[in-house]
Image: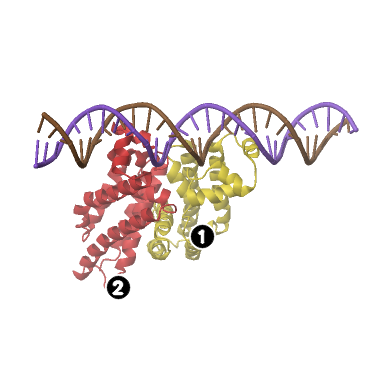
Chain colours: A yellow, B red, C brown, D purple
Amino acid sequence: MISAARLFARQGARGTSIDEILGEAQAGKSQFYHYFSDKDELIRDVHNMQIERMLALHSVIYEQLDSWEGYRLLCDTVLHLLESQRFQNGCPIGSLANELAAADELVRMDTEQYFDRKKAAVVRGLTAMKLRGELRADTDVQGLADFVVICLQGAKLVSKVRRGADAASVALEHMLKHLQSHCV
Amino acid sequence: MISAARLFARQGARGTSIDEILGEAQAGKSQFYHYFSDKDELIRDVHNMQIERMLALHSVIYEQLDSWEGYRLLCDTVLHLLESQRFQNGCPIGSLANELAAADELVRMDTEQYFDRKKAAVVRGLTAMKLRGELRADTDVQGLADFVVICLQGAKLVSKVRRGADAASVALEHMLKHLQSHCV
DNA sequence: CGAAAATTATACCGCACGGTACATTAGCCC
DNA sequence: GGGCTAATGTACCGTGCGGTATAATTTTCG
């Protein structure tokens, strides 16, 4: 399954055959159909695994989103993750969602929930700052959280196409600046 | 070819068979292989057509990016385009790039150029405003242009997953606000 | 008209893919 | 050990796919 995840991130789900996965995982077909009913189920399971994996990986950061250092850390972490794969993969969740959102409603909904949870983390952080009086009282926390999610997702897509972090990192810098413009 | 474009936008390139395209286009296989050497060539041609089509469709708006009304018009147009397809397609160029950037270097490079041209339009507009003294002299025009491209791309992806424009439109509103924060 | 060239229809090929059948092994409980 | 179930190996099947061959049709133009 982790082989599948890696291949899906690189080539997409439809661009990866079951045999290819099994080849890399050194497994036979019988094992596959013992654990999964069909390819769609594998895809959904892999996708959910990636979602949980990503949320877990960033959980520590998500708890720091009540400070600008937290947001900077978030951006840096995202960029480093992209760089560690030489900008060839982009966002595994976003990529798979983009590929299959129209074809597989379950994938679409799971991805929507992923965005919701990511957004919720930002909302928590910004709300805490607001309550502490660090942000102006009229700050649109919900809207800013959507803004952050969209910027991150866009940055990951563009860095994949550009095979580099330059545009993404400077854009995220502007995202940060906009957040900070809501300081009292 | 316009049938192919429509199907690719809905189901992705790999999720669309040649026969399916020919069925909708009411054409035979011989015609296809008369005009294209293989499926990859069709994909690239469709992709380039979409790029030119999109740039042409927005060319009037791109000339107005030296005013905030221009940027608002850009956001509104993008959102309306998404809505007109009931948020099922997202960005045809971004989606195809996301699907094939890793597999087809030509698609990747064409998409990169598309981003470049989009960015250039923003750079032109902002530079004009800067020269007119409407923007602060230290405004990072290049960075802001990357920022705009990334926000738009992210907004299109998220609206596709969310099947709605709410998050996207509020995020683009914040993008606008950030741009305007560079006023003198 | 009539030959040459471009265009279209249709039947077909090879194959890689998703999925199945069935035999074999390994673990487990009594 | 012996019987039972879960796990694995492997050979195979049907089909939908990308792509080809070839013939029929239309168009072009002298």
Relative horizontal placement of residue C17, taking residue B18 as reference (left or right): right
Mark identifier at residue A85:
1
- State whether residue B119 is above or below residue C9: below
Say which of A30 and D13 sits in front.
Answer: D13
* Residue D11: % across, % down: 64, 34
* Residue B37: % across, % down: 34, 45
Say which of A67 and C23 sits in front.
Answer: C23
Say which of D8 and A58 sits in front.
Answer: D8
| Helix, strand or loop status at disc 1 | loop
Q: Residues within 10 Å of mark 2 (few under 14, many from 20)?
A: few
Q: How many marks?
A: 2
Residue that protrudes farthest toward the bottom in the picture: B137
Mark identifier at residue B138:
2
Say which of B33 and A2 sits in front.
Answer: B33
Q: What's the residue at 30%, 48% (across, down)?
A: B45
Using the image, name the chain to which the residue with label 2 belongs.
Answer: B
* Residue D25: % across, % down: 22, 28
Using the image, name the chain to which the residue with label 1 belongs.
Answer: A
- State whether residue A27 is above or below residue A122: above
Mark identifier at residue B97:
none
